[in-house]
Amino acid sequence: MMYWLIVAFVISVFMVVTTPDRSDDHSTDEQEYDHPNLHEMNMAGDQTKKKTREQNKDHSEYHLSQGQRFIIKFKNDQIVHDSVGKKLNKKCAMIANDFKLLPMDVPWFEQDQKNIDEAMETIQREFDYSGSTFGYRRVNERLNKLWRSAYNSLLDKYNNKDLTVEEVMRTLPDYIIKDQFLKKLMERRSPRGLEISEINKGNRAKQTSHSLGSKSLAQRNYLY
């Protein structure tokens, strides 16, 4: 009996000596665990977003292949104010500021038809407005509106009421066609022109205070 007690004691001592201390292992595991770096994760996310934006720039919405055109969308026969509509605005604005092609001192409906055709053909090379029977008319109206806005902006900028007409003309930069501007300036300073100017200011003020802000009719039709 004593023999087996001694054997059992020896075995228990041997097991205690050879069993590893698990408490050290826990600390080692925690030290070796690769915690995620939040800064690096955020940076990676930003890089992914940037890459996506770069890929989107190669999309046909941004760059057209040869022979392709942007498709203008219409709602209730009005141009939809989407990304293509914004591109159309930029194109029309660029053409509208060409007063050699579309003189500012000639009323829109008295413009040389060849010049109107050239302007519309320039737009049509990049934009397809065949989605509505009113397509040509709506683009023409937009071009007309931006053309009027372009020369009125010049008048607003250089028509200093404290200066005479001759003094104003001397302040004009070289790129402005002087004879055209002079005619529009004389119109602006005429009694009728002053009356129209005041009416336009009132209309702009009402438009700004409207609940829809300065959204155009096309935008309102699209939103509602």
Image (tube, grey):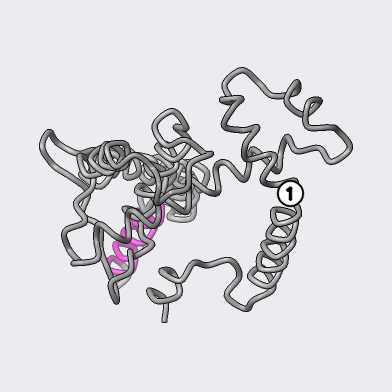
Rendered location of residue 187, percent (x, y): 66, 45
Residue 213, image quadrant? bottom right
- Main SS class of the magenta portion in the image: helix
Asked whether 120 or 219 is in front, the reply is: 120
Among all residues in the image, which is located at the extreme bottom?
A: 224
55 vs 169, nearest the viewer: 169
Q: Nearer the viewer, residue 112 or 74?
A: 112
Determine whether 125 is above or below 201 in the image. Answer: above
Q: Amino acid at mark 1?
A: Ser
- Work out whether residue 33 can be spotted: no
- The residue at 55%/48% (across/down) is 149
Residue tagged 1:
190
- Left or right of residue 99, residue 113 in this image: left
Q: Quadrant of the N terminus?
A: bottom left
Mark 1 neighbour class, 10 Å CA radius: few under 14, some 14 to 19, many 20 or more = few
Tell me residue 206's x, y (percent). 68, 72
Q: Nearer the viewer, residue 155 or 33?
A: 155
Residue 175 placed where, x, y %?
Answer: 57, 21
Residue 184 on the magenta span: no
Determine the residue positioned at 70% across, 43% down. Answer: 156
Tell me: 163 left or right of 195: right
Asked if residue 207 lies left or right of residue 195, the reply is left
Residue 206 in sight from this viewpoint: yes
Question: For the C terminus, which image quadrant?
Answer: bottom left
Please state the extent of the stretch shown in magenta in the rendering.
Answer: 3-17
